Amino acid sequence: MRFLRPFALSFGAILLLGLVFVGGYLLGDHHSARAADPSFSVLWGVQNLLKTEFLGDVPSPQAQAYGAAHGLVESYKDPFTVFVEPAPRTIERDELAGHFGGTGANIGRNDAGDLVLTVIRDQPAAKACVQDGDVLFAVNGKPVTKDMAVDQVVALVRGDEGSKVTLSLRRAGQDGTLDLTIVRARINVPSVAWRVLDDANHIGYVMISIIGEGTAGELKTGIGELAGKGVNRLVVDLRGNGGGLVDSAVDITSQFLKDGVVLREQQHGGQEKFYPVKSVQSPAQTWPLVLMVDGGTASASEIIAGALRDKGRATLIGEKTYGKGSVQRVHELGDGSSLHVTVARWLTPDRHLIDKVGLQPDVPASLSADDRKNGRDSQLARAQASLLGQR
């Protein structure tokens, strides 16, 4: 899987060492890691000293293995080459898929450190009589503690569609505990929202929040609905979009370009690969476009912005983008964790560098403190004016 999101020996070396080390540690077989690199004997020496001398709570073997894996990956000093533990990887995978099996209740931590539920209307949790403010203290009998990360708890609550999960709750004003069994359902997480922005001037608005597996399909639906309402000009909002999947970025860009190249990828050894525009039919391929960007526009969303500007299809309005131009290959490990390894860097069609540089907007526009306080979107107003030929 090719993955771009803001989050060195050769790739083969890190993968070999990482998998041998993590796999060997989890299986209790330290000999294979020692054989791979004798310098790892320092690690085993540290572990033995801790095992015999440490006074205090000893982390589980799994926690020690994850800690060592994080340390190994961090030694490569690349912020986007990361080891992701099973719980956050589950959340990440669901986010990119655009759906998951769940209860339809959001989980957050209050000031006291308790995990509190907020239900979504007409979803399984609401139908099972979960109420806003219920405190979650166990999932399928497994205690939920204040030192658990929210991602860990969310991963416990989620599961296969149609399966059951029992939530143990405390409710304000009631004594004792409440156990509710809920049948998980498919919970969709849309990544695209759209509306007619200016009916008189036929301007539509599309906001893309993440570049996931279903994003291109959602965008196609949105463009079709907007075209049916007479829209023939478009504002595309990529502010805060941290990226996602390369192939999806190509699919999205292809709905605005008829031909050409979407991005160029520089691989190990200087080899270059290019991703061509896909042959699709979309009314938006002829619409005037404005793209809204900011410091949260990163990675795959920068691919889209860079390609459309290079091809003269869009004006960028807002603030300088994040500047993440590296590609990560995601390796799913046996226990549900994953290793994200930087394997390439990408350039815009005209070979403009993005990594650590970002894209400067054609029309700089920032939200002031007063805008934020009063809920005004002056950047959107500027984008709308640009489509009308105003400054």
Image (tube, helix red, strand yellow):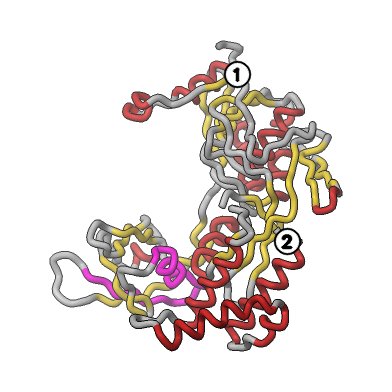
Amino acid type assigned to the residue bearing label 2 in the image: Leu
Q: Which residues are magenta?
A: 149-170
- Image location of residue 216, percent across then percent down: 66, 46
Dividing the picture into quadrants, the one containing residue 117 is bottom left
Tell me the element at label 1. Answer: helix
Amino acid type assigned to the residue bearing label 1 in the image: Leu
Residue at position x 44%, y 72% from top?
156
Give the farthest residue toward the top: 390
Tell me the element at label 2. Answer: loop
Disc with the residue nearer the chain's start (1 vs 2): 2
* Vertical order, 104 against 219 (above or below): below
Name the residue nearer the viewer: 359 or 300.
359
State the residue position of label 1: 387
Specify few, some or many for label 2: CA neighbours under 10 Å numbering under 14, 14-19, or 20 or more: few
Residue at position x 54%, y 16% from top?
385
Q: Is residue 18 left or right of residue 177?
A: right
- Image location of residue 14, percent across then percent down: 70, 66
Would residue 279 be seen by someone viewing this image from the given angle?
no
- Image location of residue 133, percent across then percent down: 25, 60
State the residue position of label 2: 9
Quadrant (top left, top right, bottom left, bottom right) of the N terminus? bottom right
| Marks 1, 2: nearer the viewer | 2
